[in-house]
Amino acid sequence: MASPFTALGAALSTIPFHGGLITVHKAADGSLHLAYPKGGNYDVVTVQSSGAADEPEFRILRGGPVHTVYLNVGGPKEWVLQFCLATEGDGASARHGHVISAAPVPALTAPYAQSIILPPTGAPAPARRIVIHGRIGAEGRLRDLKALSGPAHLILPWLPRWEFRAAQAGGKPVAVDIVLMIPPTEVM
């Protein structure tokens, strides 16, 4: 499969991180395209029973356990991505009246960023954190996105263009519900 960055020309820069190098390309519209190593993994994945109790936006995730990873986008702070198995469709539990039947939940592997597109260099940076809720589908694309707090209009138009290696459960790609938190004063 050809790289989506071929048409962008030579790399603008690279960002070193634990898994290798993130290659940064600049598009004609000024947006930055970050290409992550195809076989990469996150160095830290934390798992908890629910979203952060002290952060109301993170409590929206219902398909626990909730996993947390940190996205390196080349800024001074990493972006926080929390995710859990999507709650619709073929869930691991079903409720019938007052009876709940539960099936074992297979281990969930993190969706891994393959391509992140950021607004053009020089775009306004948020003065407050941005929190967005949505889903990464089994095909690895962000969808059903909505702003929970902050000036989300700065990044929302770019998110549907992001690509992930899909999360997996039981060896199969699965959809995950997500909350993305972008720290304030992040350079875009």
Image (spheres, rainbow, N blue to C red):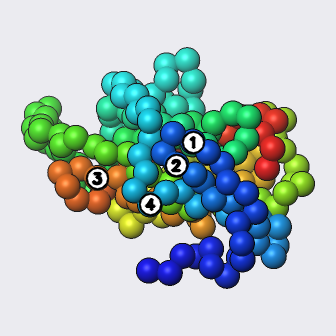
Establish if 106 lies above or below 14: above
Residue at numbered disc 4: 38
- Which one is in front in this view, the residue at disc 4 or the one at disc 3? 4
- Which one is in front in this view, the residue at disc 3 or the one at disc 1? 1
Query: Which element is circle 1 on?
Result: strand
Residue at numbered disc 1: 17
Query: Reading the chain from its start, which is encountered first: label 3 or label 1?
Result: 1
Task: Tell me if 13 is positioned left or right of 103 in this view.
Answer: right
Q: Quadrant of residue 50?
A: top left
Query: Which element is circle 2 on?
Result: strand
Tell me the distance, in whole angstroms, between the alpha carbons under discs 2 and 1: 6 Å
Percent coordinates x, y for residue 125 in the rendering? 84, 44
Query: Reading the chain from its start, which is encountered first: label 4 or label 3?
Result: 4
Number of the label disc, if any, that sits on residue 178: none
- Residue sitting at 72 percent across and 77 percent down? 9
Kindly identify the amino acid type of the residue bearing the numbered disc 3.
Gln
Residue at numbered disc 3: 168
**Do labels 2 and 1 touch, CB within 8 Å?**
yes
Q: Quadrant of residue 186?
A: top right
